[in-house]
Image (tube, rainbow, N blue to C red):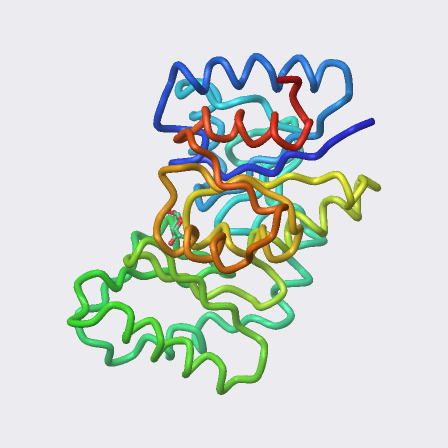
Amino acid sequence: MQWTLASDIDGTLTGDREALDRLREKLQVKRDSSELYLILCTGRRLDQVTSGIAEEGLPQADAVICQVGTEIYLPPLGDDMPPMEAWRARLLEQYSRSEAEGFLAGIEGLRMQPDMFNTELKTSCYVDECPDPDAAAAEIRRRAAQQGDRYLVVYSSGRDLDILPAASGKGKAIRFLIEQRGLDLGRVVVAGDTGNDIAMFDELGRGVVVANAQPELRDYAQQSASDDVYQARHEFAAGVEEGLTHFGVLAG
Ligand code: GLC
């Protein structure tokens, strides 16, 4: 029986190279016997994922979700390949980048993220130098909500803020892939460490919060009070491995 693991990369898989090397070997064995479908689900760009597979010890994956759930890629991965058009077209229908940029207007201390993290479907900035970052994020959320339910505002680590199409985000992108590939929605585990990972837990239900997670995800895990949200004792890849063992995806 096949499981799907959808894992964030930075601070979830990366952070402890020895632990990642151990986990990667175990995941590969499961992939080789078709017992695991592995999705990397990240805020990174595709070329940062492919270089991570080559140089940082990231595992080979069956699908890659980039830019916080706004782009989906299936192997063979090539740095210049276009994202999956079916997903892109669906999101473009509801997203206006200029409208999203308007929600950021006049907020003191706000800085845009580098161009490579600002795309046709993702408007991203930093709020950590605003006088009150949480209040800035709340104001942006309030403005976006005035446009009905077309936008999703994702706030992570007290610093990163993304305005995405409401139909995107990491969780919805995973669900789309699972349905498109005919995978079992009942056998999915997610893994993460920050606020942009909350959407994965919300959408899929079962997952691992690594011990080094940011307060926003730890608070979420505590509030959810669900046995399906497992708070690992270990950090980084060792925490992911611990969680996968807990859920029976990996043998103890
Ligand atoms: C990643 C992305 C960044 C985003 C952050 C939080 O770091 O590169 O654009 O703001 O994740 O979602």
| Vertical comparison of 33 with 116: above or below | above
Quadrant of the rendered image containing residue 51: top left
Q: Quadrant of the C terminus?
A: top right
* Residue 10 showing in the rendered view: no
Vertical comparison of 47 with 86: above or below: above
Quadrant in the rendering for residue 108: bottom left
Residue 200 or residue 245, whichever sits in front: 245
Image: 226 above or below 78:
below
Q: How many marks?
A: 0
Residue lying at 53% horizontally and 27% vertically, measured from the top left: 242
Horizontal arrangement in the rendering, residue 79 relative to residue 173 (left or right): left
Q: Nearer the viewer, residue 15 or 252?
A: 252
Quadrant of the image for the N terminus?
Answer: top right
Is any atom of residue 132 visible in this view? yes
Residue drawn at point x = 57 percent, y = 49 percent = 71
Q: Residue at x 48, y 23 (%)?
A: 58
Q: Position of residue 97 (x, y in %)?
A: 46, 70
Instruction: Give the vertical position of 26 relative to 221 (above or below).
Output: above
Which picture quadrant has residue 10? Answer: top left
Point 23% across, 63% down: residue: 111
Image spot of residue 114 (x, y percent)? 30, 52
Camera-side residue of 165 and 248: 248
Q: x, y (%) of residue 118?
A: 40, 56
